Image (cartoon, rainbow, N blue to C red):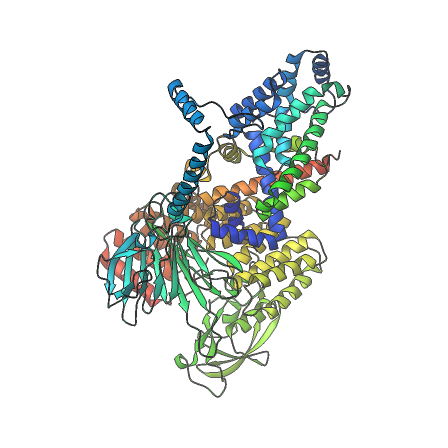
């Protein structure tokens, strides 16, 4: 499934040759995307015509009128084409226009041409011309000495890496400032590292046990007027490299290739590493791309993905690269003014998912997680797994807390079935709203049986109005999908299969939209944001009047830092259901991320007029004021947030930061200590 | 954005101008070109998947109409007649281009041309007028975006700088606007079947 942004770049002719070719291949398989491209181009031409400049239109009109006034139609066509598209066309049968040389030169050329009328001279001239042509061709196609083009130098050397120039057998140990050429091969061993700075400022760092090759320019490129400032591509033969690419206007391609895939930079910082196969595995090469900043096109013959900041994608020989997965749960966004903004975009958890499903899923208001046995109370007799599942978050008001469960309790069985992993528990709860489950748990006072009444989570915003039987249909679909979830859950084929499955459901477009929304939630649970966004997008397309779909799409877009699009969707949600505090908070946050600080602050102030006791809004206000360096006001807002939710470490962190900025260091230290005393994942009210 | 005059059925003004041209008044052809150029140009642009030939085919359409004006049937739509000429020229040009360039075309271009070849000429004869109507409802901010792109011919990077948005926003929003316009055109054509 091709991403919308990739298609938009493709239509804007903004893709480099490699990704463009890969996308063309994808389009051959994706009829829907191909139709989209064709329709977009049709509309593009029509808009160019309807909205194009008046001058262009006038030229065309004049050419038509001149043509009908008696001139040759063909001559005028040539004229209009030359005027409107900059192409000069010589008409068939028309002689070349006379060159504007001075008369004596024309006469001299005429004389020379007369001289060549003689047969002997003509023969001699022909032979000379053939000879000259042969020599010229030889010179033209002679291999250019591209192997010695210097593209950079060593900026750091640890240990004794080896450098080999082109096909030469000799190797040398590079030192600082040793130049590096196209055609060179560089290797590091167990204790070596190296950093190269190319002429444009791009850096390439080689880790331990790494080999790279800088290929010479091919024949086509060797005709370039000036030597390249960095290699257009680097072959990574083993190990790992990290590169920080210098941004340039009209920058030429910069790619890192392995046998399994190619990564093409778009002004970015990223790393590529080749993983050695584990013992017992086949020798298919695995290449891992890690992107820190910007975006990288990662592709091979089987598919293409675009990895954005803080994501990782893996490509194996013979399979397409995986959908990029996020690395961090806390993303730090660098803003234009040089400041940064911390954005929590943790993968969707099961209780959160319940609020996104149409109709609401089951929720116990807790969190459970797997803990390695070594770090837990050893009890190998009751559970042979290396992990046990423990209650990790338990807000006081949650249904789970009210059954007498304690933080840290180990879940042994659920409805008499042995608990082996956290997802098993979370799925059971998500799929059974309004039901009860029997849990056997082991706590500090020994084992006990508790009966947990599962609640039904309220949707974040209004969902669709569906027929009575629709919830049952949707729930059964969700159960099927969850049961079929395996390690391929994020593969393109799996996505395509599920999309097709939704398409086959008999029912209204409203039911299809709801199914796509729930499919989006499922993908988001797997942290497969690309497929999730596409599924939510489909839900919005099919039923654009449902605010829940817009919000789900907006929140998923926010996770991939697509803030402009996230803003559009969340604004649509707000338009359809005004008055939601959650939506207003997200809007304010995204406005701030887009640099609309005063708007964000005004929204937060307005929100506090109606939600005076909302902890999250006070926290957001504190964050916005800290960004504006208004430490006194930030301190007060953070104090209020702490007062409303003393268990939330984030509020303490803002308070500490505000106190520190205000120079109240002792109080700041105390606030930091309070924050550290709380569990980092303590639940904060939202 | 100048709205296209809606002149579907033979208007009196068109009829008078055509009669004047038929009687030998060459100058009467100018207001006819003025009245129908935009619509025919947009029609050709919409139907001919070869952008650099749009001007050429529009030019040929008017010249052909001028030379064959004696064959025009009074009482029928002059724009409809021009559109029929344009559609024939588009078809012929598309087939020629496909024959000559087929092996050099990228897959998407080839498919676009194949689609155009299979489309019937009369299928969407009111598409341009519908599109022009839809353009009137485009919100102000998006209208600015469209003008920057299509009137000023700015690149996405220039538009992004001018609107203080990201390049990605510009590209995605343009796609979205085009999609919405297409859907609007389809709605209008469905609502008022020919």
Question: Left or right: where does residue A184 sit relative to residue B53?
Answer: left
In this view of the protein, which residue sits in the foreground, A350 or A651?
A: A350
Q: Position of residue A610 (x, y in %)?
A: 47, 47
Question: Left or right: where does residue A372 sit relative to residue A59?
Answer: left
In this view of the protein, which residue sits in the foreground, A225 or A247?
A: A225
Q: Residue at x 67, y 57 (%)?
A: A503
Question: Left or right: where does residue A465 sit relative to residue A323?
Answer: right
Q: Image height check: is A487 above or below A578? A: below
Question: Left or right: where does residue A133 sit relative to residue A493?
Answer: left
Q: Image height check: is A2 above or below A109? A: below
Quarter of the rendering containing residue A576: top right
Q: Residue at x 71, y 60 (%)?
A: A469
Residue A213 can be seen, yes or no = yes
Q: Position of residue A601 (x, y in %)?
A: 40, 44
Q: Position of residue A554 (x, y in %)?
A: 51, 51
Quarter of the rendering containing residue A292: bottom left
> In the displayed image of the protein, which residue is found farthest to the bottom?
A381
Residue A548 can be seen, yes or no = no
């Amino acid at each position: 499934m091709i991403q919308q942004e990739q298609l938009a770049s493709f239509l804007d002719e903004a893709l480099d040759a490699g990704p463009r070719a890969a996308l063309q291949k994808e389009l051959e398989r994706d009829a829907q995307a191909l139709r989209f491209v064709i329709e977009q181009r049709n509309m593009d031409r029509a808009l160019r015509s309807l909205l194009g400049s008046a001058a262009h239109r006038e030229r065309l009109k004049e050419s038509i009128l001149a043509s009908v006034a008696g001139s040759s139609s063909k001559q005028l066509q040539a004229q209009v084409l030359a005027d409107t598209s900059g192409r000069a066309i010589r008409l068939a049968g028309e002689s070349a226009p006379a060159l504007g040389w001075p008369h004596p030169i024309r006469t001299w050329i005429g004389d020379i041409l007369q001289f060549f009328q003689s047969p002997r001279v003509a023969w001699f001239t022909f032979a000379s011309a053939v000879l000259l042509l042969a020599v010229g061709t030889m010179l033209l196609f002679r291999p250019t000495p591209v192997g010695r083009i210097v593209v950079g130098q060593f900026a750091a050397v640890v240990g004794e890496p080896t450098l080999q120039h082109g096909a030469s057998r000799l190797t040398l140990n590079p030192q600082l400032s040793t130049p590096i050429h196209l055609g060179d091969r560089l290797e590091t061993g167990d204790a070596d590292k190296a950093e190269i700075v190319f002429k444009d400022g791009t850096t390439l760092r080689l880790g331990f046990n790494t080999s790279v090759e800088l290929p010479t320019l091919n024949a086509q490129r060797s005709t370039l007027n000036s030597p390249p400032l960095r290699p257009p591509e680097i072959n990574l033969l083993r190990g790992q490299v990290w590169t920080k690419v210098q941004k340039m206007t009209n920058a030429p391609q910069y790619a890192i290739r392995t046998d399994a895939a190619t990564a093409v930079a778009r002004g970015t910082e990223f790393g590529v590493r080749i993983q050695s196969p584990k013992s017992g595995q086949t020798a298919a090469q695995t290449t891992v791309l890690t992107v820190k900043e910007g975006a990288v096109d990662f592709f091979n013959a089987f598919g293409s993905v675009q990895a954005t900041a803080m994501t990782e994608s893996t490509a194996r020989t013979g399979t397409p690269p995986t959908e990029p997965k996020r690395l961090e749960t806390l993303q730090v966004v660098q803003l234009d003014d040089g400041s940064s903004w911390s954005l929590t975009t943790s993968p969707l958890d099961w209780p959160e998912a319940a609020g996104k499903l149409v109709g609401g899923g089951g929720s116990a208001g807790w969190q459970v997680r797997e803990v390695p046995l070594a770090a837990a109370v050893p009890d190998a007799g009751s559970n042979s797994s290396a992990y046990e599942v423990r209650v990790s978050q338990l807000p006081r008001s949650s249904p789970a807390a009210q059954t007498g469960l304690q933080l840290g309790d180990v879940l042994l069985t659920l409805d008499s079935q042995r608990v082996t992993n956290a997802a098993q528990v979370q799925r059971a709860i998500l799929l059974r709203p309004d039901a009860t489950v029997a849990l056997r748990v082991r706590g500090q006072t020994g084992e006990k049986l508790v009966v947990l009444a599962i609640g039904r989570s309220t949707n974040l915003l209004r969902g669709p109005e569906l027929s009575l039987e629709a919830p049952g249909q949707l729930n059964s679909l969700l159960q099927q999908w969850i049961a079929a979830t395996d390690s391929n859950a994020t593969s393109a084929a799996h996505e395509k299969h599920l999309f097709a499955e939704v398409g086959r459901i008999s029912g209204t477009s409203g039911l299809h939209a709801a199914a796509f929304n729930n499919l989006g939630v499922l993908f988001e649970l797997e942290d497969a944001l690309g497929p999730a966004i596409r599924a939510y997008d489909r839900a919005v397309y099919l039923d654009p009047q449902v605010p829940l779909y817009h919000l789900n799409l907006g929140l998923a877009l926010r996770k991939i830092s697509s803030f402009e699009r996230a803003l559009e969707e969340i604004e649509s949600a707000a338009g359809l259901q005004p008055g939601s505090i959650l939506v207003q908070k997200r809007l304010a946050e995204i406005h701030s991320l887009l640099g609309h600080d005063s708007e964000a602050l005004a929204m937060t102030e307005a929100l506090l007029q109606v939600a005076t006791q909302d902890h999250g809004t006070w926290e957001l206000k504190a964050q916005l004021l800290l960004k504006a360096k208004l430490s006194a006001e930030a301190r007060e807002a953070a104090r209020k947030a702490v007062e409303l939710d003393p268990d939330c470490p984030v509020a303490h962190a803002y308070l500490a930061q505000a106190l520190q900025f205000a120079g109240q260091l002792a109080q700041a230290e105390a606030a930091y200590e309070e924050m550290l005393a709380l569990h980092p994942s303590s639940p904060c009210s939202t | 954005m100048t709205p296209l005059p809606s002149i579907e059925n033979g208007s009196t003004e068109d009829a008078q101008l055509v009669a004047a041209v038929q009687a030998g008044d060459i100058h009467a052809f100018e207001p006819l070109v003025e009245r129908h150029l935009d619509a025919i140009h947009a029609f050709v642009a919409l139907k001919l998947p070869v952008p650099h030939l749009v001007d050429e085919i529009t030019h040929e359409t008017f010249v052909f109409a001028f030379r064959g004006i004696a064959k025009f049937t009074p009482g029928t739509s002059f724009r409809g007649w021009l559109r029929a000429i344009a559609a024939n020229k588009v078809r012929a040009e598309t087939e020629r281009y496909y024959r000559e360039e087929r092996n050099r075309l990228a897959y998407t271009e080839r498919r676009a041309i194949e689609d155009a070849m299979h489309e019937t000429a009369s299928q969407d004869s009111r598409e341009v007028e519908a599109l022009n109507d839809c353009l009137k409802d485009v919100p102000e901010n998006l209208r600015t975006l469209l003008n920057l792109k299509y009137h000023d011919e700015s690149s996405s990077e220039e538009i992004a700088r001018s609107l203080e948005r990201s390049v990605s926003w510009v590209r995605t929003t343009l796609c979205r606007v085009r999609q919405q316009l297409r859907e609007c055109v389809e709605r209008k054509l469905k609502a008022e079947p020919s």
